[in-house]
Amino acid sequence: MPWWTFSAIDVVDIFLASRGHKARVYEFGAGASTIWLAKRSGSVDSVEHDAPFAQTMSHMFEAYPNITVRVVEPTVASVSSKARSNRKGYRESSFDQYVSSIDRVEGTFDLIVIDGRARVSCLAKSVSRLSPNGMVLFDNSNRAEYREAINSCGLQERVTRGLAPALPFPSQTSILTLGA
């Protein structure tokens, strides 16, 4: 089960069911949500920055032929690096290749999940890859470092707040859409 708010999980579940469980999904940050999404979607393309974690999960992913996980580890940041993470241990890393991994898959996506590293850059890259009636799920959207990017991305935000699986405190997940 994803670690998004329970209400966001419900929104996505209904959204994917409305597409006959044939939706195309791109996910920044693989994990339990990848399997949950695969059970409800036509295809899930996911990128993960942590190779040991991806290796640990690989036997579970292999049970679902509609999952493709790419491991794209961060590189040492340079002056030209655009995609960065504020996460401790990754501040001197570039996630440019991680963010651009979405370009390895053709077409648009019904759902894009942003729940990994370099989320601001992932959001900027995702807007043009969203299908006309699609949605972006942006987890932990309550964090101050994400607010400007969410407010200026051109998508309409629906905020869900509350408890999430495996978290002992309330969280926030935003659903972003192109609007009417």
Image (cartoon, rainbow, N blue to C red):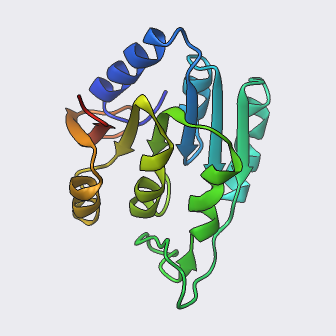
Tell me which residue sits at (57%, 69%) in the image: 95
Q: Residue furthest bottom?
A: 79
Say whether residue 108 is left or right of residue 103: left
Say whether residue 85 is left or right of residue 34: left
Tell me which residue sits at (41%, 58%) in the image: 124
Q: Position of residue 43 (x, y in %)?
A: 65, 26
Q: Is residue 71 visible?
A: yes
Q: Nearer the viewer, residue 23 or 54?
A: 23
Picture quadrant where residue 170 is located? top left
Q: Above or below — where is 101 with respect to 177?
A: below
Tell me which residue sits at (53%, 91%) in the image: 79
Tell me which residue sits at (67%, 41%) in the image: 106
Q: Nearer the viewer, residue 166 or 28?
A: 28
Q: Above or below — where is 66 with respect to 3?
A: above
Q: Position of residue 12 (x, y in %)?
A: 39, 23
Q: Nearer the viewer, residue 24 or 52?
A: 24
Q: Above or below — where is 160 with respect to 19?
A: below
Q: Position of residue 64 (x, y in %)?
A: 74, 23
Q: Position of residue 45 (x, y in %)?
A: 65, 38
Q: Is residue 49 visible?
A: no
How many numbered discs sit on the rendered protein?
A: 0
Q: Nearer the viewer, residue 116 or 103?
A: 103
Say whether residue 170 is left or right of residue 83: left
The quadrant the C terminus occupies is top left
